[in-house]
Image (tube, helix red, strand yellow):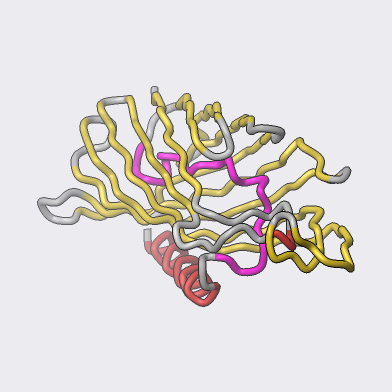
Amino acid sequence: MRRSVVMTLVVSMALVPVCETAQAQHLGYKSQALDASMVDGTALGLHGSGFLEYARGEPGWTLAGGVAVGQGMLRASYAEGYVDRFYSLGYARTLTSTRAGVIGAFSTGLDFTAAYNGHRFFGYAQRAARIAIPLTLRVGPPLRNSLALYVAPFGEIGRARLLHAHCSNAFSCTAPVWYSDDVTRAAGVGAGGEITIRRLSIDLQFRDLLSRDFVYDRYPTASGVQMQLGFSLRF
């Protein structure tokens, strides 16, 4: 338990200052390979032997499933957008859980995701990995009737083929213009709410709430608020 607490504090302390100094929740540029990835409910204090989930939002629809491994949940997902095809693997677990008086319980979790975008932008497919540390306040018992509110500081790293130019908008770019395979890095804070009715959960998640507008001269590393609404069944 002490080791879990120490690890949570260390990672959270490392991520939060980065998010704060990044201004608009970005340090460098992010890869869109993780656009369809949501925080697993296991990192929010829910448990079980497995789950199935369907979500809608940016960039399209997502279908995910998981199975309990050790003290956490191993999951896989597939998502489709307009031209994108996302494949991801992840692992999530609850690290600590503490009673918060009559309100409910406060928990911390760990969520790791590795993702790949099958759509090739000028012959190169984006890929990335992310670690999130959800901090959750849950009212009511998990897998009964409960409400959870959480924030999830995260850091990610990946690779993408990026456009380099001087662009004032989507239709005005000046030379020189070139492409290169670059390392992408980002940090930020996700947030969301989850309603659980027995084994059915409804989860609304937001990412990049304070993000700036689209970065045209680093296409396709888009920035902007993202939202997903998911429905999951745990068994």
> Seen from this angle, which residue lies furthest left?
102
Viewed as shown, does residue 147 lie left or right of 205?
A: left
Please provide percent x and percent y for residue 32. Answer: 66, 48
Please provide percent x and percent y for residue 171. Answer: 74, 55
Residue at the spot 20% in from the left edge and 53% down from the top edge = 99
Q: Nearer the viewer, residue 173 or 28?
A: 173
Please provide percent x and percent y for residue 34. Answer: 62, 46
> Seen from this angle, which residue lies furthest front?
172
Viewed as shown, does residue 227 lie left or right of 101?
A: right
Q: Which residues are magenta?
A: 26-46
Q: Nearer the viewer, residue 94 or 198?
A: 198
In this rendering, does residue 97 appear at all? Answer: no
Please state, as top left, top right, bottom left or bottom right, where the C terminus lies in the image: top left
- Where 36 sits versus 221, above or below? above
Residue at the spot 55% in from the left edge and 73% down from the top edge = 22
Q: Is residue 16 magenta?
A: no
Q: Nearer the viewer, residue 4 or 193?
A: 193
